[in-house]
Image: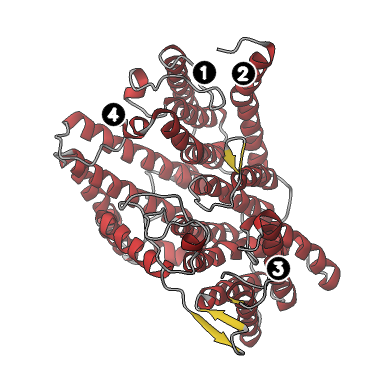
Amino acid sequence: MVTNGRGLAGRVGYGLLFVAVLPALLWSWAIRLDAVVRWPVPDWHTPGLVLAGAGSLLALAGMRALIVRGRGLPMNAYPPLNFVANGVYAFLAHPIYAGAFLVAVGASLWMGSASGLVLVAPALGLMMVSLVYGYERPALRRRFGARAIAHRPWLALPPSDGAATRGPRRLATAAAIAAPWLFAGYAIDFARHGPAITAPYLSLWQPTEWSAPWRFTWLVPGVFLLAHVLLARTNRQLRHASIAAIAWAAAMLCLDVVAPPLGDDLARSAPWLALVAAAAAALAAGWRAVWDVTRAVAEAVANSRCDWLLLGGRLRVINHAAFSFALGAVSAAMACAVLRDPAPVLLGIVCVLAGAALYAQLSWGSGALLRPFGFWGSVPGLAVALVLARVLFGTPLLQVTLAAVLAAPFGQAIGRLRCLAQGCCHGVPSDARFGIRVWQAQSRVVVLSKLAGAWILPTQLYSILFNLALGPLLVSMWLAHVFPATLVVGAYFFLTGIERFAEDAYRGETQTRTIAGLKEPQWIALGSVVGGMALTVVPSPVLLPQPLPAGSTWVATAITGGLLTAFAMSVDFPRSHARFSRLSG
């Protein structure tokens, strides 16, 4: 252990950052959000205090185990020398983080902070999950090998083997899935409806035309999936049943959050909810087959590239122009629905494309990468668009920003298909359970990373799934007519930063630099998280949806936006060696 002043100061400063500064920032964030969005909160002061105390004890037990058994400190910058798998770590993989989350939930209940309970505590949980997958798991593998990843605490998904599993573990697993889901549903519904709520979810999903027994039919698929958890006999069965139950619970919780702002008629009417719940259960129960099919489609897209040469070979159109066109068209249509004016929409697309191209050129442009694009470059490009739109068209800055962030997730989800076909943004080497293989001779996977035929993680697919969840969430926040525009914008940058921090840890492109143990985009993602938090508390009005522009204007804007994007991202000049001329060899 280092005992010099510099080492001691570093340890003290790092420790204070996480045990004092971060909690203070989170608490301040919750207080400011409570002033922005006023929601009711359950009158559970004493249970909240008990929960916070239990979380503190759990976190302290985890810290003690790392200090005593690990012979180190519970800090990523000063990690333990030994891998700890006993004590509290025999039950939980991350007791410190679990304890901190319980403290956040308990403190929110104790102090009566609805924003702390519904927004800040879940945000803290997402940050910790991102840190685990974006840094700690790779770091543990480097320090302790496969043993660290193979460790399976009692409250964790079991290994996929045929060993028998015991009843207490099955019961604990079912409770660990059901209890948080029910509590989260109760907290969300209480914030939405107040003390009138009688049971989790039921205040939301109470169609008046249904008789009382039918109000519960949508729960049947969840009960069925939990029964499979309780009846599992082997680790493999328990693992499969647990993932299915978690997937269904997460899907229904997302539906509970997203659907109501779309309209009471949609949220409350008819037995459509029971049908959706049953369909979600069927997909969740067959999650392995769904995942294998999804990977197969991703692999087919990754090997689908073909080119059309025009003007005697001087102009090339790559077939992923279809994805690029759809990216620009959908983004333009979404943004036009917010701005109602095509001019700032098309200006924004041009500036965002230019920013993404310029950022990538300055970061890793070379003779092999003459026209790369970088996602984070779109942010300064958007900033330029804000100024120009204000000066040229008088469009309010906040309105342009809101339009951009509402369109971005849908556009990026489509754009990642283009990334698959181009071979950019690909993942690190993997194995057959999680990866895809690329053989297409012009793909960056083959040309630059030299990974032809190797199993690699489909990181583009992870981004697609995340953005398909983020997009409806942001739209529902906007349509709720409750959240200030800056809160919606801040939520985009905050959640995108969290996802990108984890995703970029598994990116395998050779040009990506590593700085102080993190990949360069991960540092930018951290900045996005902090900036997003700050934006959520900036005072701003609630921007209400406006009537859509005339159909011909809307369609023309979408087509023009699609053509601009397709030309920038899928059309090049293969005989030229000038900067920005070629997308690939």
In the figure, 329 relative to 233: above or below? below
Q: How far apart are marks 4 and 2 (CA)?
A: 31 Å
Identify the mark nearer the N-term, 1 or 2.
2
Image quadrant in which you'd find residue 70:
top left
Mark 1 Cα shell of 10 Å, populated few (<14), some (14-19), many (≥20)? many
| Residue 89 horizontal/vertical position (percent) | 36, 23
Mark 2 Cα shell of 10 Å, populated few (<14), some (14-19), many (≥20)? some
For label 3, the residue is: 579
Q: Helix or strand or loop: what does disc 4 sit on?
A: loop
Q: Can residue 277 be seen in this view?
A: no
| Residue 308 horizontal/vertical position (percent) | 52, 84
Identify the mark nearer the N-term, 2 or 3.
2
For label 2, the residue is: 11
For label 4, the residue is: 154
Identify the mark nearer the N-term, 3 or 1.
1
Q: How far apart are marks 3 and 1 (CA)?
A: 49 Å
